[in-house]
Amino acid sequence: MRDALVAGLSLNIFNKHCDRVKMANIAQLINVLQAVILTEGPKMLRTPTYHVFHMYKYHQDADLVESYIDGVEQIGEDEKFKVPNLQESASVDKDGVVTITLNNLSIDKAEEVEIAFAECNPKY
């Protein structure tokens, strides 16, 4: 679960800072820490990191959409290092399809989310 949370948070950060982050790579893919795939002999396993990367692929070649989450609980042990419990990123592709990715940092508390679009001119 930790690897999936770290992967999702990292990819959201990269997407939200795409004006400065032009390319981000994963150094090693197989049988390492934060691996995308694990193998043992003839067996292969897709990890939680693999599934996060698969879900985030829809941000690729899309444009960042300004987004924010309102009224979210802050978590962390030290007040100066607290972060929002929910993290988000949104983008729109050339066909007008909006992709929204959310990360819930809690491993045991579900969050109800309502999404609202402001000043949106959808393509039909």
Image (tube, rainbow, N blue to C red):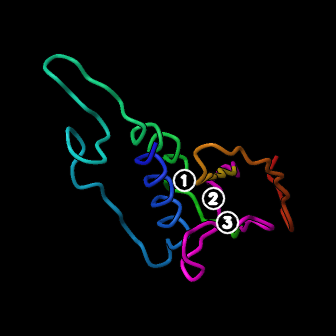
Furthest residue to the top?
42
**Callout 3: helix, strand or loop?**
loop
User: Which quadrant of the structure image shows residue 89?
Assistant: bottom right
Residue located beneath label 1 in the image? 59
Residue at position x 55%, y 47% in the image: 58
Q: Residues within 10 Å of mark 1 (few under 14, many from 20)?
A: many
The residue lying toward the viewer, choosing from 76 and 26, is: 76
- Please provide the residue range marked out in magenta: 68-97
In terms of sequence position, does the residue under pointer 2 or pointer 3 come before the other?
3
Residue located beneath label 2 in the image? 91
Position of 99 relative to 75 (above/below): above
The answer to whether residue 40 is left or right of residue 75 is left
The residue lying toward the viewer, choosing from 93 and 41, is: 41
The magenta stretch spans residue 75: yes
Furthest residue to the left?
41
Q: Which mark is residue 65?
A: 3
Q: Are marks 1 and 3 in contact (CB under 8 Å)?
A: no
Q: Are marks 2 and 3 in contact (CB under 8 Å)?
A: yes
Disc 1 residue type?
Answer: His
Residue at position x 22%, y 18% in the image: 43
Task: From the top left corner, tell me how far across and down residue 103 is, in percent.
Answer: 60, 53
Disc 2 residue type?
Answer: Ser
Q: CA distance from mark 2 to mark 3?
A: 5 Å
In terms of sequence position, does the residue under pointer 1 or pointer 3 come before the other?
1
Furthest residue to the front?
77
The residue lying toward the viewer, choosing from 91 and 43, is: 43
The answer to whether residue 47 is left or right of residue 117 is left
